[in-house]
Amino acid sequence: MHIRPYEASDQAAVIALWQKCELTRPWNNAGLDIERKLAVNREWFLVGELQGEIVSSAMFGYEGHRGWVNYLAVHPAHQGQGFARAMMAYGEQLLLGAGCPKLNLQVRSSNAQALAFYARLGYGIDEVVSLGKRLIPDV
């Protein structure tokens, strides 16, 4: 798999990947999420290609205190081949290079497969509650 920054021509394939991986939600407009990411560290929005096909994605960010990853996805037909691990390692190196001391991420509590994956990578559950407030409605 070749990891590279997202390009505008990738949008349809990336959104289809997110839908296939069940990452999209009605209250989040995937196209707007992409547009917003491209305004901030656009080069940290990554895709993984295999024989010209986008099979993975991840959005990394850092605001000076903590790093974040969103939309880590690997096409179900390609899961279990180390692609998610490679995307995370790539992103961790980007963040480390920027001086980021810690990477945070959110996983839906019902997603046992993702929780197990991140545990294998050394991520643990922080004793915090994730809160959110929508400032701009997507729908």
Image (cartoon, grey):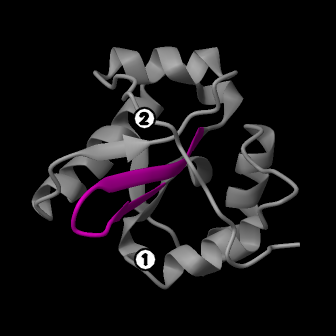
Q: Which residue is drawn at 69% across and 26% down?
A: 77
Amino acid type of disc 1? Arg
Q: Which image quadrant: the C terminus?
A: bottom right
Q: Are marks 2 and 1 in contact (CB under 8 Å)?
A: no
Q: Which of marks 2 and 1 is nearer the N terminus?
A: 1
Residue depicted at 60% across the width and 28% down the height: 78
Q: What stretch is highlighted in magenta?
A: 59-73
Between disc 2 and disc 1, the foreground one is: 2
Amino acid found under the numbered disc labelled 2: Val
For image coordinates 22% across by 58% down, the residue present is 94
Q: Quadrant of residue 5?
A: bottom left
Q: In this view, does 6 lie to the left or right of 24?
A: left
Q: How far apart are marks 2 and 1 (CA)?
A: 29 Å
Residue 128: mark:
2
Which secondary structure class fits the magenta region best? strand
Compared with 135, 72 (above or below) is above
Q: Crowding near pointer 2: few (<14 within 10 Å), some, many (20+)? A: few
Query: Considering only vertical position in the picture, is 128 above or below 7?
Result: above
As displayed, is residue 105 above or below residue 81?
A: below
Q: Mark 1: few, some, or many residues within 10 Å (few <14, many ≥20)? A: some
Secondary-structure class at tag 2: loop
Left or right placement of residue 124 versus residue 93 in this view: right
> Which mark, by number, is residue 104?
none
Residue 8 at x, y percent in the picture = 61, 79
Q: Is 117 within the magenta? A: no
Question: Where's residue 46, x and y in %?
Answer: 45, 59
Question: Which residue appears farthest toward the bottom when viewing the image?
Answer: 39
Q: Helix or strand or loop: what does disc 1 sit on?
A: helix
Task: Name above or below for residue 9 compared with residue 59.
Answer: below
Task: Give the camera-side residue of 54 and 89.
Answer: 89
Q: In this view, does 82 lie to the left or right of 80?
A: left
Image mark for residue 42: 1
